[in-house]
Image (tube, rainbow, N blue to C red):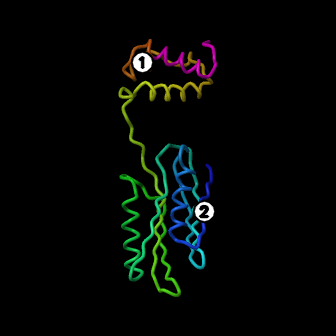
Amino acid sequence: MELINIQHDSASIEDCVTNVAIKSKEALSGRRGYIASSKIELSFGAFMNLSITLALDFGKDMGKGIAVDYAHGRGRGDALGKAVEGLNKKLPEKAQIVDFQLGTYVTPVTRRTYAVAVAVYNVPSERKPLHEFGINERRALLRRILEEFNYNPRVLNISEIARTFGVSRDSIYYDIEQILKEKGIRRR
């Protein structure tokens, strides 16, 4: 498990929402795992503050992200409706929402109503049959398997791997040879 915090505060709601979206993409891109839980803190006043703490679990790998949107309207209901509508458009297809938060703020002088909607989500990885893997995907998977076995190719059943991927044994031997060469490891 790992905790990640994404936070921004600003006098501008737009600036705060935009920066949290950018920071979340940077913080989550390339990270393995899935979001097991989260805590969202949203507060308004002279500054808007949005803080999201995520608990990443490395048990399985999923797509993950944070969607944020804001809107203004004639009243709280109108603003919230628009913000939720905008948020729904930003959520990927098949997204599984882990947590969400909605908040409204009415400016003291102009009496303008703003709403902010935040959702933390995971997206299940689509499983592709192994026989449809291209050479780069096949090598990436073989690289991870070899890494688990300290780059010892003798533990692998080359015939079974070749059958599973729908390629020749020679292709698998060549893949392994290239992976070991990249790592600077001589074949044992």
Q: In x, y percent, where is residue 84?
A: 39, 68
Q: Secondary structure at mark 1?
A: helix
Taking the spot 48% from the left edge, 86% from the top edge, the residue there is 110
Quadrant where the C terminus sits is top right
Q: Give the number of the disc on residue 7.
A: 2
Taking the spot 45% from the left edge, 29% from the top edge, the residue there is 137
2 or 1: mark nearer the eye: 2
**Relative to 186, is 83 on the left or the right?**
left
The verdict on residue 62 being magenta is: no
Q: Give the number of the disc on residue 162.
A: 1
Inter-mark Cα distance, 2 to 1: 48 Å
Q: Which residues are magenta?
A: 172-188
Taking the spot 56% from the left edge, 19% from the top edge, the residue there is 155
Amino acid type at mark 1: Ala
Q: Give the number of the disc on residue 174.
A: none
Q: Secondary structure at mark 2?
A: strand
Tally the marks: 2
